[in-house]
Image (cartoon, coloured by chain):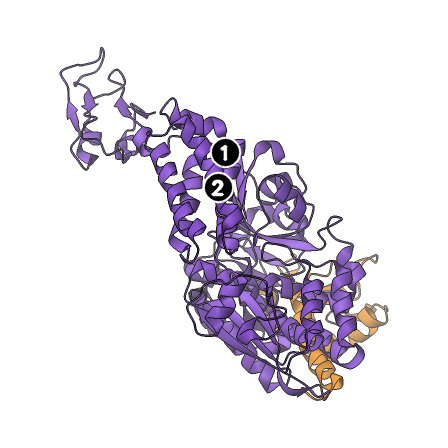
Chain colours: A orange, B purple
Amino acid sequence: MKSLAELQAIRERAKAELNLRKENPNSARVLVGMATCGIAAGARPVLNAFTEEIAKRGLQEDITVTQTGCIGICQFEPVVEVEIPGEEKVTYVKMTPEKVARVVNDHLVNKNVVTEYTIGANT
Amino acid sequence: MYRSNVLVCGGTGCTSSDSLKIVEKLKEEIKNNGLEKEVNVITTGCFGLCALGPIMVVYPEGSFYSMVKIEDIPEIVEEHLLKGRIVTRLLYQETVEEDTIKSLNKTAFYAKQNRVALRNCGVIDPEKIDDYIAQDGYAALGKVLTEMKPEEVIQTILDSGLRGRGGAGFPTGLKWKFAAANDADQKYVCCNADEGDPGAFMDRSVLEGDPHAVLEAMAIAGYAIGASQGYIYVRAEYPIAVKRLQIAIEQAHEYGLLGDDIFGTGFNFDIKLRLGAGAFVCGEETSLMTSIEGKRGEPRPRPPFPALKGLYQKPTILNNVETYANVAQIILKGPEWFASMGTEKSKGTKVFALGGKINHTGLVEVPMGTTLREIVYEIGGGIPNGKKFKAAQTGGPSGGCIPEEHLDVKIDYDNLIEIGSMMGSGGLIVMDEDNCMVDVAKFFLEFTVDESCGKCTPCRIGTKRLLEMLEKITNGQGTLEMLDEMEELCYYIKANSLCGLGQTAPNPVLSTLRYFKDEYIAHVVDKKCPAGVCKNLLEFNIDRDKCIGCGMCSRKCPVSAISVTDYTAPGKKKPAYAIDHSKCIKCGACIDTCKFKAVSKG
């Protein structure tokens, strides 16, 4: 180690992973339905796509990606719920890994709900 | 990038209940379910709640699983990690509320704690330097080397009010200042990790959970006093701590955070490990240094103090593990932050190893000034089986017993000394009505007699005589005059011993004489042990009207002291049994066997 910048670089790299191990009560939450119906419909690639996208943008401290059980609308799986503190919960249905980047960018970062993916637009 | 992290405690407590096998099984199950790229398994240091081990925490949910068994792993992996359904049945019950799950930090055990020295324990992987760096590790060393002069570092530590966590509470900054002021071609920075008090395991947990924190602080101390070599004196009985320290030193070398020209500033610092063979006296500073030199661990008179002539006759500082664990935080957050915690004369936090008759056995870190009542009843969860609190023992063989009347004393160095105990390194053993205080004093004296190095007479012979008197008392041969003689001898040993071991060895006797004299008197005058511990003062009897004559006790008795009589109680079918007191060895097997509560002791 010959400089503080080197230490800083290691810290930034390592921090991303470590932040997953802390509870942040104020973080936004992405809940992916991972019951049997969700998994069968392809929820796992969706879950992983969220994790990757959020890590790529360095947002682990502000957004928690977590799994949840079946919420009862199995025909719409994979279902993803987005909870931003102080705002109403939004439910996205029939999610795919391809749709993930837009939800992160538009909704979680820029606070614009991607209406066309929501349950309202699909019933 | 992992979506989930599973933290499994790899401290000594959980390891001894097979947490490492749990890690293996976890990895296997995760692989079976094809989750190895999504779920990360990390072995961490101690979480503190050792009574509930093995402990496992799953993030991002923060689910706290306690007393995990290997058989539970497939369920946790399939349900929680794959399907996202938390296995509520295995959660630490206090975190489960009606339909929600409470955050771990809001449970009684953690809510009142403030983890500074233990901040990384149970969070980082102690075998990965990157994890430590992510938690601002080595940033304090970087700051010190590039922005601060040695005197500024010492002033910062002085201003923080940090005092030695090893027991005596000497101001750390002052120690550093003295050593810095002495010119020499070589100086040394030593770390006392020879944790020897029965029931104390704070230092072990810091070393196991966050070894780099100690290395970083030693390098900072080296810069402050002008030393280039450090030694950590650690017990060989702490194999996990030793292994993690070795890994940490190696990794710090690889990154150039130890060695030559650290951060390109020209500052050189290296650390070597020295394993202690387990002699209690080697925790005393002059003995410790003698032992590092490769000689028999015996104390020598002070002055000269180590700051002038320590290891290899060179200026040396010696600080305890927990003391070092605070240093980097003080540099980064400022002395005012540290001084804002605690009481007027004792700043910061203190780690206690809670043990004995307490529900939450484990490790707790609280601000100085927290009361014993809060630690025992709120954090510690009270005393098991509804028993009554009798005393808390702090400071190990050098400390004393704190009775119920002092439960509300704010714990800090000076208050504990005032009530006849001492902070010690932080062992806190809770005792209930079933503990005999004379027996407790005898236990600690047996320990000090064993561990006295024998170099000075007051300690070698004095503690032996003291123990003999205690043995007489617990055997029913004590006299009231003996109590006065004991007290006089205690003061003599305290005043005349060479080192801290002898100077504090009588404390358990003095403090129990002070607060529990009635128990001593019961032993001496009534020849009774009120707690029912001292065997020679006990008599076992069978209530012949309660005995149904089943003969179970007679069969269990190892010395055939129980035989049948010719008395049959009204309403009973078989004759009762009786104990022959001339044969009875008072092992208590009969009491444990009898289902009809017919056997009594007293």
Which numbered marker is on residue B490? 2
Residue A63 drawn above or below residue B404: below
Residue B582 drawn above or below residue A113: above
Mark 2 neighbour class, 10 Å CA radius: few under 14, some 14 to 19, many 20 or more: many
Quarter assignment of residue B61 = bottom right
x, y (%) of residue B231?
A: 55, 74
Residue drawn at the location 39% of the way across and 23% of the way down = B525
Q: Amino acid at mark 1?
A: Leu
Residue drawn at the location 48% of the way across and 72% of the way down = B292
Q: Nearer the viewer, mark 2 or mark 1?
A: 2
Q: Amino acid at mark 2?
A: Cys
Which numbered marker is on residue A101? none
Q: Tell me if residue B258 can be seen.
A: yes
Q: Is residue A57 left or right of residue B560?
A: right
**Residue A114 or residue B565, whichever sits in front:** B565
Quarter assignment of residue B169 = bottom right
Considering the numbered disc 2 on the image, is that residue within a helix, a strand or a loop?
helix
Instruction: Using the rendered image, report if marks 2 and 1 lie on a common chain.
Output: yes
| Chain on which label 1 sits | B
Q: Of marks 2 and 1, which one's residue comes earlier in the chain? A: 2
x, y (%) of residue B527?
A: 35, 25
Answer yes or no: do the residues labelled 2 and 1 have beta carbons within 8 Å? yes
Considering the numbered disc 1 on the image, is that residue within a helix, a strand or a loop?
helix
Residue ID for mark 1: B513
Q: Is residue B533 left or right of residue B433?
A: left
Q: Is residue A39 left or right of residue A57?
A: left
